[in-house]
Amino acid sequence: MSDPEHHVEQPAECTTELPKFPPRPTDTAQMPVLLIREEPPVPVSPEPVPEMLEKDRLLRLGTRVVGLIAAVALCGTAWALLTRGNTEEGTPVPAPGAEAQGRYQFTEHHIQRTPHCEAHAYDDTKVFLSRHRCEEVVQQLLTTHTADGSRVVVAVSVVRMPTASDAEALKKLTDTDGTGNVNDLLREGRRVPSGPSSLIDAGYAAALDGRAVVIAEADFFDPERSDDTLLREIAVDALRAGHPYTS
């Protein structure tokens, strides 16, 4: 018999059980198949051959040249339009060519252009121009000086007619005394610095140039000075100033 005083109770055995899970069902679904689409290869341009490069260069050069020509033409047109009106005072009149330099150097102070010729003429010349319509009249007011320093004012008129026969008839009329003429710009109120207000004893000259009549009159600044031969010589030389406006 055991001794109760000495009886020692043994501890219970400790055991730990792992939790049990239901079995995992077998995954029989198939994974989606990813299709990879290949892009078609990018075509590679062939290297340009030297002939193609040269043609392209010439084409670009030609385009630039054409553009430059167009710009120059536009500028030329703009300049022509600007110079059709009155010019600044003291503009030298260029000669048409070396062979037409003439004896005197003229300076242009005023220029006026209009198709209404009869409104810028008087007496029989006005009547003629009202019956025979002109294309245009150009009126210039110039100055020059003689070898001794005398100053001279010169009026040049260019009347462009439809036909050469009309121009010839107009010249014949203005060459005749007492038949009137195309107005000089002094008669229409224009002036040159320190110059006269009218032509008194002017030298006269006229010439045909195709369908145009060019008329020139010259007079001294000094009303006391007179020299018909010299003034006519200056008027003849001044006809070349109207040449650029005859066509």
Image: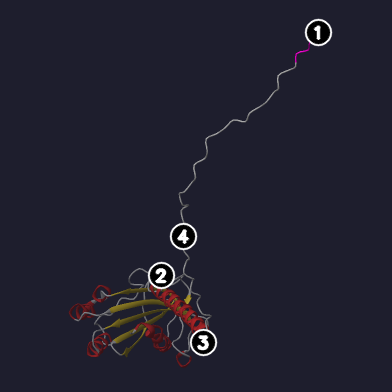
| Distance from the alpha carbon under mark 2 to that under mark 4 | 97 Å
Q: Nearer the viewer, residue 104 or 117?
A: 117
Task: Point out residue 155 in the picture as x, y percentages from the top left corner.
Answer: 38, 79
Q: Residues within 10 Å of mark 2 (few under 14, many from 20)?
A: some
The secondary structure type at the circle numbered 1 is loop
* Residue underneath mark 1: 3
Label 4 sits on what residue type?
Leu
Task: In the rendered view, tell whether residue 31 sits above or below residue 111.
Answer: above
Task: Point out residue 207 in the picture as x, y percentages from the top left corner.
Answer: 33, 89
* Residue underneath mark 4: 35
Q: In the rendered structure, which segment of residues is drawn in magenta?
A: 2-9
Q: Which mark is residue 191?
A: 2
| Distance from the alpha carbon under mark 2 to that under mark 1 | 163 Å
> Can residue 224 be seen?
no
Q: Earlier in the sequence, mark 4 or mark 1?
A: 1
Occupied quadrant, residue 79: bottom left
* Residue underneath mark 3: 51
The secondary structure type at the circle numbered 3 is helix
Q: Are the residues at dot 2 and dot 1 in contact (C-beta closer than 8 Å)?
A: no
> Can residue 95 be seen?
yes
Q: Earlier in the sequence, mark 3 or mark 2?
A: 3
The quadrant of the image that shows the C terminus is bottom left
Tag nearer the camera, 2 or 1: 1
Tag nearer the camera, 4 or 3: 4
| Distance from the alpha carbon under mark 3 to that under mark 2 | 67 Å
